[in-house]
Image: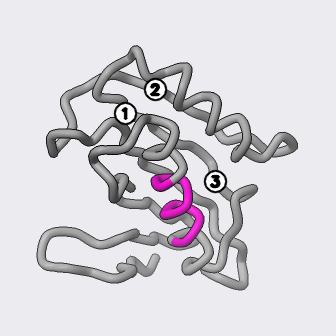
Amino acid sequence: MTLSRLNPGPRMSQAVTIGNIAFLAGQVPDDLTADIETQTRQVLAKMDAVIAELGAAKVDIASIQVWLADMADFQGMNAVWDEWVSKDAPPARATGGTALARPGMRVEMIAVVALPEAAA
């Protein structure tokens, strides 16, 4: 089985694929002064971009881990999530609270995506 990396950098790759499974790096917001809704939209937009670059779509997401710096942001994150998620093909999801890498970062998301046969 072939392992390949999408946009590798000195510390990590945006995604690593093994066969037709892609493991995305944690997607984080750009604006660390923004509220949870804005940060969630930024993270989901980045996730959409990486998934598209892999040749997949939102319906191909198998699972997502959501990490919140403050569980009090759960409702605000979910409000944006509910607008974004595929109603016909929602992924498995887990949400947890943890200290995130940088001050002001409120949300980070990690995904596993099944690549269509043509993209794999």
Q: Earlier in the sequence, mark 1 or mark 3?
A: 3
Residue 40 vs residue 64, the one in the foreground: 40
The stretch in magenta equals 42-49
Give the SS element for disc 1.
strand
Q: Residues within 10 Å of mark 3 (few under 14, many from 20)?
A: many
Amino acid at circle 2: Thr
- Residue 57 position, x and y percent, is 70, 66
Residue position for label 2: 95
Residue position for label 1: 67
Q: Identify the residue at image location x=28%, y=28%.
A: 69
- The residues tagged by marks 2 and 1 sit, at their Cα atoms, a distance apart of 6 Å
Q: In this view, does 108 lie to the left or right of 119?
A: left
Q: Identify the residue at image location x=63%, y=38%.
A: 81
Instruction: Name the image quarter holding the C terminus.
Output: bottom right
Q: Identify the residue at image location x=16%, y=44%.
A: 101
- The rendered magenta stretch, by its main secondary structure, is classed as helix
- Residue 111 position, x and y percent, is 49, 51
**Mark 1 vs mark 3: in front:** 1
Q: Name the colour scheme.
A: one colour
- Residue 99 position, x and y percent, is 19, 29
Q: Is residue 27 magenta?
A: no
Residue position for label 3: 61
**Residue farthest along the top direction in this orientation:** 72
**Image position of 54 with respect to 65: above or below:** below
Q: Identify the residue at image location x=55%, y=20%.
A: 75
Amino acid at circle 3: Ile
Q: Residue 82 carries which label?
A: none
